[in-house]
Amino acid sequence: MKTVLVDLDGVLNEYCGDYKEDFIPALREHAKEFLEILSKNYKVVIFSSRPEKLVQKWIEENSLSSYIDYVTKEKKPAFVQLDDRCIKFNGNYTDAIENIKNFKPFWKKSN
């Protein structure tokens, strides 16, 4: 079964840049249904730089345990990664520089 590496903050929760070390924001709308569907065909691994015990507690509190294989802080081999702070490399370094320079996560309002 292929692995999908899913970021916690900004993908599964309502994170929008206000990091608090001991608090994980609320579950995003439809995230549970998303994980349920995903877990039927993929191994789901949650990626987070937060303390693993805190993440595990949040997963339990949101009844997500049955959809998640494990939690990691490391970039693990995966079929794909789902993250709110990524840029897809298209083979062109000039494009990559521009994309990095102009990057904004979806939740950041443009000025």
Image (tube, grey):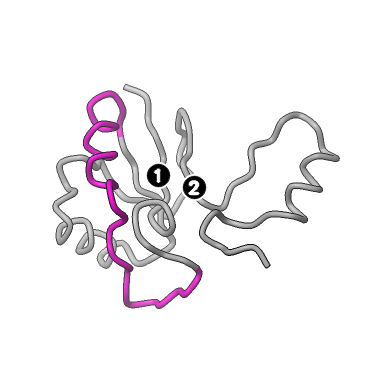
Quarter of the image where one finds residue 102: bottom right
Rendered-image quadrant of the C terminus: bottom right
| Magenta stretch secondary structure, dominant | loop
Does dot 1 land on a helix, a strand or a loop?
Answer: strand
First reached walking from the N terminus: tag 2 or tag 1: 1
* Magenta stretch bounds: 17-43
Identify which residue is drawn at 40% across, 77% down.
Answer: 20
**Circle number at residue 98:** none
Please identify the residue farthest to the front as the structure is shown: 111
Q: How many marks?
A: 2
Q: Residue 50 in the image: x percent, y percent?
A: 39, 65
- Distance from disc 2 to disc 1, alpha carbons, whole Å, reads 6 Å
Few, some or many residues within 10 Å of mark 1 (<14, 14–19, 20+): many
Cβ atoms under marks 2 and 1 closer than 8 Å = yes
**Kind of residue indicated by mark 2:** Asp
Q: Position of residue 16 (x, y in %)?
A: 47, 66
Q: Residue furthest right?
A: 94
Q: Is residue 20 above or below residue 43?
A: below
Q: Identify the residue at image location x=28%, y=61%.
A: 55
Residue bearing the label numbered 1: 6
- SS category of the residue bearing label 2: loop
User: Would residue 70 appear left or right of 83 to someone viewing this image?
Assistant: left
* Residue 21 among those drawn in magenta: yes
Rendered location of residue 86, percent (x, y): 59, 47
Question: Where residue 107 sits in the image (x, y, percent)?
Answer: 51, 59
The residue pinned by badge 2 equals: 83
